Amino acid sequence: MSASAQSGQQHLINNLDATSEGFDFLDLKAQFATIREEVIFSVLSVMESQKFILGDEVRLFEEEVAAMMSAKYAVGCASGSDALMLALMAAGIQTGDEVITTPFTFVATAGSIARLGAKPVFVDIDPDTFNIDVKQIESAVTSATQAIMPIHLFGLPADLDPILSLAKAKDIAVIEDAAQAIGAKYNGRYVGTIGTFGCFSFFPSKNLGCAGDGGLVTTEDAILADRLRLLRVHGSRKKYQHEIVGVNSRLDSLQAAILRVKLGHLGNWTSARQMLAMRYAELFEAYGLVGEVKLPHVADSGSEAVFNQFTIRSKKRDELRDFLRAAGIPSEIYYPVPLHLQPAFNYLGYGKGQFPESERACQEVLSLPIYPELSSARQVAVVRGISDFYKTRL
Ligand SMILES: *Cc1c(COP(=O)(O)O)cnc(C)c1O
């Protein structure tokens, strides 16, 4: 064994000692501990009322979340996936229509399009932002294109201006998948309020998470908001009178009550995530790792990322992840397989090599722990672990 490999082994051992207890990638219990009484009180009051479907809690949450992001209308629904589907339905997307999005995202983005019988048309990502490469959108537009669905992946705002001007010229909708980006800003405006629709998820691991599934659609258009409200209750304004064919996709009153409590803390939690992201950048710099790993793109002035994930890139991602796991340091891969190579989307006829940046991202990305309550000791342990890995490779 060479001297450097030996010293690498020694580092691994030191590191094991330092973090041998291990910790979780995401610790939701730490957050609950800070809001326990408030949440229990609000859940109890819904239970006492025995009013579980829509009602005041949902209406008030919709008003409060709309005010928070300066959106005109907000319509709660059963999940982020349904938010995307309802927005597509309200935009009139149907069989045979094409909707442009990227293959580097959570499956629901393209799944919502496919569920309506429409066709997801993929465009590759910009490797710096993980978001849709705006330069490649125009050549994907056909006479069947009815919408563009950009994703603000990991809480990093997508470059919306070129998308909006193209959509305007072609008279098509822009449906923002803001599931990971509540509170993020693009040119001073909240993402999700800039396109035709903004779609949000309250899945527990999102920046504003409920106690199960929940979602929301925002829009600036009164007619579209009315349509969303109809669609989520079987197309019905009056009991047993159905104007259009809709679905059952409501935000539960219980979830809305919990979300109202948590919304009051979102600003502080977002600041904490942004501080942690800055600190990660400082630590990677201090450990001399900036050449080895690529850090997430920091938003331009006027834009703000909210870091639902802190996702780095490494050419040795799999080895790095194994090394960290052995040292008790958690990490995750979002996402290991691009959607165009998923069996579910075989029928679209795409093949390997067609979206090289998305495919490369799937090989190189590694998400590190980031949540408001993450301690600085653990954050240092993560970066030190990565540093130890690269020392063993010298
Ligand atoms: C979480 C997520 C969704 C779906 O949200 P659910 O509430 O889990 O249905 C959609 N798109 C993206 C990018 C997501 O991260």
Image (tube, helix red, strand yellow):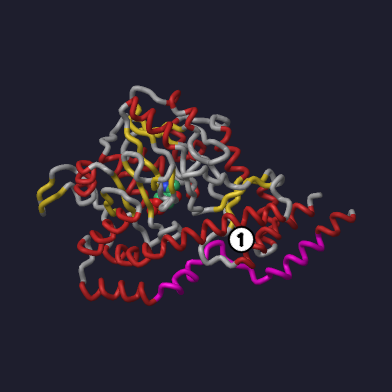
What secondary structure is marked by label 1? loop
In the image, residue 338 sits, relative to residue 318, either above or below, namely above
Amino acid, disc 1: Pro
Q: Main secondary structure of the magenta part?
A: helix
In the image, residue 54 sits, relative to residue 291, either above or below, namely below
On the picture, is 62 further left or further right than 333?
Answer: left
Residue at left offset 46%, top offset 46%: 106
Residue at left offset 48%, top offset 53%: 306
Q: How many marks?
A: 1
Residue 357 inside the magenta-drawn segment: no
On the picture, is 43 further left or further right than 330?
Answer: left
Circle 1 residue: 330
Instruction: Report x, y in % for residue 232.
Output: 23, 50
Residue 23 inside the magenta-drawn segment: yes
Q: Quadrant of residue 352?
A: top right
Q: Nearer the viewer, residue 290 or 84?
A: 290
Instruction: Report x, y in % for residue 279.
Output: 61, 58
Instruction: Report x, y in % for residue 144.
Output: 33, 25
- The boundaries of the magenta stretch are 9-36
In the image, residue 381 sits, relative to residue 128, either above or below, namely below
Q: Nearer the viewer, residue 183 or 240?
A: 183
Residue 211 visible in the current orientation: no
Q: Quadrant of the N terminus?
A: bottom right
Instruction: Report x, y in % for residue 229.
Output: 21, 49
